[in-house]
Amino acid sequence: MTIYALSSGPGISGIAVIRISGQNCSKVIKSMTVGSFPRPRVATLKKINKINTNELIDEGIIIWFPGPNSYTGEDMAELHVHGSRAVINEIHNSISKVENCRLANPGEFTKIAFQNNKINLLKAESIADLISSETEIQRKQAIKIMSGKSSEKFNSWREKLIKILSNVEAKIDFPDENLPDDILKDIKSSSKKIKEEIKKLLDDEKIGERIREGFKISIVGPTNAGKSSLLNYLSKRDVAIVSEIAGTTRDVVETHLNIDGYPVIVSDTAGIRESKDEIEKRGIKLALKRAEDADLNLVIIEPKSVDFTGFLNDLINEKAIVVLNKSDLGIKSINANLNKFNPIVISLKDEKNIDQLILEIKKRLKKSFISSEDILITRERHRQHLEQCVYHLENFEKKNKIDDFDKAAEDLRLATRHLGIIVGKVDVEEILGSIFNDFCIGK
Ligand SMILES: Nc1nc2c(ncn2[C@@H]2O[C@H](COP(=O)(O)OP(=O)(O)O)[C@@H](O)[C@H]2O)c(=O)[nH]1
Ligand SMILES: [Mg+2]
């Protein structure tokens, strides 16, 4: 099968790049151009015609990448044409008429690259991360993983486990032969060492995932405290409806921000109060769930609600900043209970003291993005397989103690398999779909 797709962004643009990959790639070029065939990897200006005619669609650059030295490993070509919808449609239309040519699925070029051993799964995922990166820290993380350091680490652990496994299997195959003591010791100490290293990596407070997905801040508190006003202020636009009518916000309203280069997702939530309204009640439930999942909660209250009890007490903990809004209305005194939490007193109406709040947010952000590690776990998928690997290594250790070698070997095999799945070294058909479906078409 030969696939094709627009690889540059959709919409009108100066230049658009259409990519083709597969056996019939050269046939496509031959039937849409005249004259000599482009030389490999040389940008060649060509008239691009409707299929098998001399009717010009556009003039553009063709680059021919014969396989296997291409991104996918197959024959590939790029057509750089003018980025108009009509030009792109007509080129797509012509390519579709060449036999065995069809539009690519999302991520299909990268999936073929993986299947042809051009890249491993970690690299494929980091390409997707790089494409969707919005901030500098996300770009840096994606590039770090693309450079292969994490893959090297996972592979080296896996190779060490395979070596241990071969020793354990030798013992099974030749039970009468006594394994030299130092090999037995070596098995124990090296599997333990790998387990400890993986555990250390897992104990990372999820920084890698936070960088990839964004730091989650939710704005919570009683109705009418100014939650939606704060979201609008932070995002510099009217994202949420602000109104004096209590209970206006029901759904969670989310916005992506870039604060000092850190990716942040801020959610405005329904004000929390006793309510009989079914929909409002559901909104309140969502609000509490968001607060639970957030990395940081901005608990916002107003002078009227300073005597808080119940749910507010639950929300105020080490991952919260307490904000007392509407200082323009006059705040007589802050009770001792509230003072304990060092509330930041602001007025959104008069735009007073908000910079102090932002400073505090930045401080928290910086703290949660500090990492000296070269290798970071960026996806739940990696975390789960690493946890499974540790689990099987622990089982291995237990059995190792009573010399139950047959079963111990199976634990070791499973541990190795989970490491292999992360980089894509074992049969991974079932996870491929979920990974590549996240890509855009054309990549
Ligand atoms: N006086 C005063 N009113 C404010 C301030 N911030 C918000 N408000 C008003 O308080 C009401 C509720 O605000 P809103 O942002 O919708 O609160 P939410 O229910 O917590 O989302 C609106 O009428 C706002 O204009 C403030 O700093 N001072
Ligand atoms: Mg609101």
Image (cartoon, helix red, strand yellow):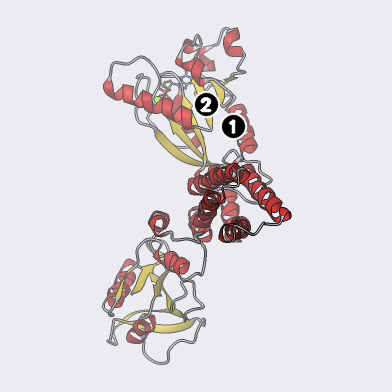
Residue 117 at x, y percent in the picture: 50, 69
In which quadrant is the N terminus drawn?
bottom left
Helix, strand or loop at mark 2: strand
Residue 97 shows up from this direction: yes
Is tag 2's residue or tag 1's residue first in the polypeptide sequence? 2
* Circle 2 residue: 298
Helix, strand or loop at mark 1: helix
In this view of the protein, which residue sits in the foreground, 72 or 382? 382
User: Height in image: 1 above or below 395?
Assistant: below
Q: Residue visible at 37% across and 23% down?
A: 284
Q: Which picture quadrant has residue 251?
A: top left
Q: Is residue 369 left or right of residue 134?
A: right
Residue 247 at x, y percent in the picture: 35, 21
Q: How many marks?
A: 2
Residue 31 at x, y percent in the picture: 32, 86
Q: Which picture quadrant has residue 401?
A: top right
Crowd band around label 2 with a 10 angstrom C-alpha radius: few (<14), some (14–19), many (20+): many
**Which amino acid lies under the numbered mark 2 shown in the image of this protein?**
Leu
User: Height in image: 28 above or below 317?
Assistant: below
Q: Is residue 268 left or right of residue 144?
A: left
Q: Is residue 89 left or right of residue 391?
A: left
